[in-house]
Image (spheres, rainbow, N blue to C red):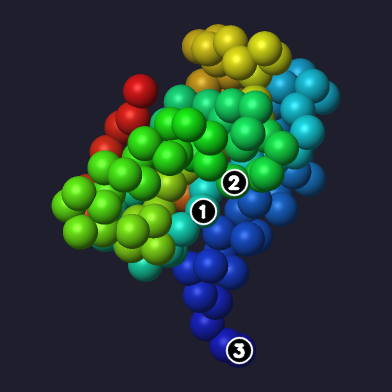
Amino acid sequence: MAQSTKQQDLDALAAKIAADDVCAELRAQATQLVFGAGNPDAGIVFIGEAPGKSEDLEGIPFVGRAGQFLNEMLQTIGMKREDIYITNIVKYRPPNNRDPEPEEKEACNEWLINELKIIAPKLIVFLG
């Protein structure tokens, strides 16, 4: 049997989050799941709190203004988005871009930990 790649494992995890209806209340009000993106073999993972409006529409973390700023900051240190992996604690946009509630973060915690286990980064950077 062929060994799965990190990307296959991440894709399976994203599918499981959707299938298990994680954070059902948030999911009901969001456009789509915003799972992590980037290089699954990256040594650095950036973690934000929750997707915003742009992320909800595109299904990719950090594509709005904060993402543009992050891209500029990465460029100043000679890196690109393709060099890192980026995700959020909460996988669905909270209504009106409000901060996620503690219980919403807790509900997504297991999935974030599983995501990090797959990537096995050397460095985790929390954004906020």
Could you tell me how many numbered marks the image carries? Answer: 3
Q: Which residue is mark 1?
A: 37
Q: How much space separates mark 2 and mark 1, taking CA atoms?
A: 7 Å
Query: Going 51% across and 75% down the picture, which residue do you hit?
Result: 5
Which element type, helix, strand or loop, lies under badge 2? loop
Q: Are marks 2 and 3 in contact (CB under 8 Å)?
A: no
Amino acid type at circle 2 is Ile
Q: Is residue 94 above or below residue 63?
A: above
Q: Are marks 2 and 1 in contact (CB under 8 Å)?
A: yes
Query: Going 78% across and 45% down the picture, which residue do you hit?
Result: 19
Q: How much space separates mark 2 and mark 3, taking CA atoms?
A: 31 Å
Which element type, helix, strand or loop, lies under badge 1? strand
Query: Going 36% across and 46% down the picture, which residue do you hit?
Result: 71
Residue closer to the observer: 118 or 1: 118
Residue 44, x across and y down, in percent: 28, 53
Q: Which residue is mark 3?
A: 1
Tell whether 43 sits left or right of 87: left
Tell whether 15 sits left or right of 48: right
- Residue 64 shows up from this direction: yes
Q: How much space separates mark 1 and mark 3, taking CA atoms?
A: 27 Å
Q: Which residue is mark 2?
A: 60
Quadrant showing the N terminus: bottom right
